[in-house]
Image: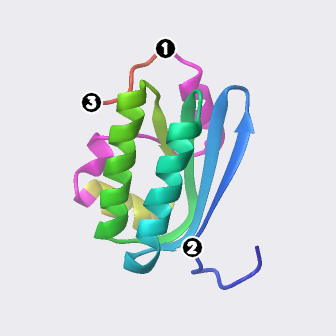
Amino acid sequence: MVGDASEFRLEREMGDGVTVVVAAGDIDMTASREFGRRLDGVLRASSGDVVLDMLQVVYLDSTALRALLASRKVAEERGSRLVLVVAQKAVLHVLEVTGLSALFEMRPTRAAALRAIGTADEPKR
């Protein structure tokens, strides 16, 4: 997809029983509803665990945090793990300041998230 770096995108990749979702751009009030709807759809359609790669996310606001919390609930209801890939300091800061970093399993790279999925660790509750 070509466009402004702040344009929201959510792309889905499949492989090895894990669904990888890549979010990019700004996830703000304008994009959060679509972000939440599409992430919910991916989680409900996935037969296994989901990695949400947020390395290309530039900004997220409180509406995006609500969408993440709703997605966490869907993953728990389905008995699947939702692992976030977060390394962008601004995004990591928002998750830490709001206390959400304690609720989500987070890894700094996609490879680390996929390795974590491969372990028997239980998702955070």
Q: Quadrant of the C terminus?
A: top left
**Residue stretch rendered in magenta on the structure:** 97-119
* Residue 29 drawn above or below residue 48: below
Q: Amino acid at mark 2?
A: Phe
Q: How far across and down, in percent of the image, does residue 67 sit?
A: 36, 57
Q: Identify the residue at horizontal 58%, vertical 58% (top origin).
A: 55
Q: Answer with the quarter of the image where residue 93 lies.
A: bottom left
Report the amino acid beneath label 3: Arg
The number of numbered discs placed on residues in the rendered structure image is 3
Residue 33 falls in image quadrant: bottom left
Earlier sequence position, callout 2 versus callout 3: 2
The answer to which of marks 1 and 3 sits earlier in the sequence is: 1
User: For this rendering, which residue is in front, 112 or 42?
Assistant: 42
* Element type at mark 1: loop
- Is residue 112 visible in the rendered image? The answer is yes
Q: Nearer the viewer, residue 70 or 20?
A: 70
> Could you give the CA–CA distance between mark 1 and mark 3, rounded to whole angstroms?
15 Å
Q: Secondary structure at mark 2?
A: loop
Q: Which residue is mark 2?
A: 8
The amino acid pointed to by label 1 is Ala
**Circles 2, 3 touching at the beta carbon (< 8 Å):** no
Question: Could you say where residue 23 lies in the image, as x and y percent from the top left?
Answer: 58, 60
Q: Could you tell me which residue is drawn at 37 percent across and 77 percent down?
A: 29
Question: At 64% from the left edge and 43% from the top edge, which residue is drawn?
Answer: 20
Provide residue 21's location: percent of width, then percent of height.
61, 49
